[in-house]
Image (tube, grey):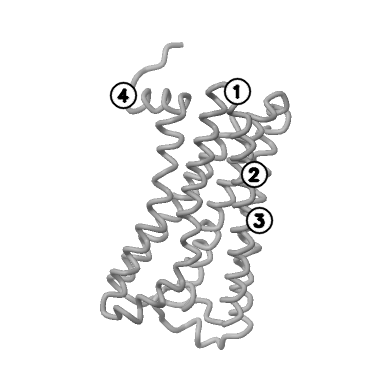
Amino acid sequence: MNPRYILFIHLVVNDMIVVTLTVILFIVSYTLYKINVSVCCIYVLFLIFTTENTPLNLACMAVECYIAICLPLRHTQICTVKRTLMLIGLIWTTSIISGIPDLFITLATEPLDFFHSRVFCLRKNAFPHPLLVKKRDITYITFLVIVWITIFYTYFKILFTAKTANTDAKKARDTILLHGFQLLLCMSSYATALLKDALQRWFPKNYADSLFAIYIIVQILPRSISPIIYGIRDNTFRKYLKRHLLCKVSKP
């Protein structure tokens, strides 16, 4: 019933989807190497949706921390369960609206034989139209600006409050700072397209290994920070974590 943990659960589920899909794609890339374009398009679309969800979810969690610390009397009125679920729906809607035009443009511009061919499953191979590259860059820059403005605004507002408030505000300030670091790692995925192209030219024989290294840095590291923020630093979450890890039976 806590909006903060609802957003966190959504973040974890979203990250589980990302990791599962990318692991499957890496297994396919090392075994089959190429797959059908239609299957690749579906995989890439889901990866676009879930990858873009992560920074938007982090921004919403930062706003929730800001309301809890800077507007404590209105927190229960603003951050309700219903509004939190609506916010999650808005996050998914934004990501879908951002990614689904790639499919429509590809369907309109590519011949039917293209969807029966086999490719190495990357976004640029599944959606090869040059216009989609520009559209992707514009979308990423827009998301980057909006989310970073949100992170900076909430951090400095909480920082100002923490100077004259209790330890909860200071802890929230540190949490926002960790969100910023996590977001920085997530946003590094927006620069991987150029890096992948460079690695393909420099190391054509070890391209799959290069993709795996980028995957660890860009996809796994940012998603390993969330358990630290909420599994170790958060007192409430730590209490339940200990209970389940140690298989303790709660008293009625």
Residue 242: x and y, percent? 36, 25
- Tell me which numbered mark, 4 or 1, is placed earlier along the sequence: 1
CA gap between label 2 and label 3 equals: 24 Å
The residue at which mark 4 appears reads as: 246
The residue at which mark 3 appears reads as: 93
Q: Are marks 2 and 3 in contact (CB under 8 Å)?
A: no
Vertical position of residue 123 compared to residue 7: above or below = below
Residue 21: x and y, percent? 42, 59
Label 2 amino acid? Answer: Tyr
Tag 1 secondary structure: loop
Residue furthest top as drawn: 252
The residue at which mark 2 appears reads as: 153
Q: Are marks 2 and 4 in contact (CB under 8 Å)?
A: no
- The numbered dot on residue 125 is none
- Tell me which numbered mark, 2 or 4, is placed earlier along the sequence: 2
Viewer-side label of 2, 4: 2
Residue at horizontal 29 percent and vertical 78 percent from the top: 203
Viewer-side label of 2, 3: 2
CA gap between label 2 and label 1 equals: 18 Å
Q: Are marks 4 and 1 in contact (CB under 8 Å)?
A: no
Tag 4 secondary structure: loop
Quadrant in which the N terminus is drawn: top right
Viewer-side label of 4, 1: 1
Q: Are marks 3 and 4 in contact (CB under 8 Å)?
A: no
Of 70 and 239, the residue lying toward us = 70
The answer to which image quadrant residue 112 occupies is: bottom right
Of 55 and 127, the residue lying toward us = 55
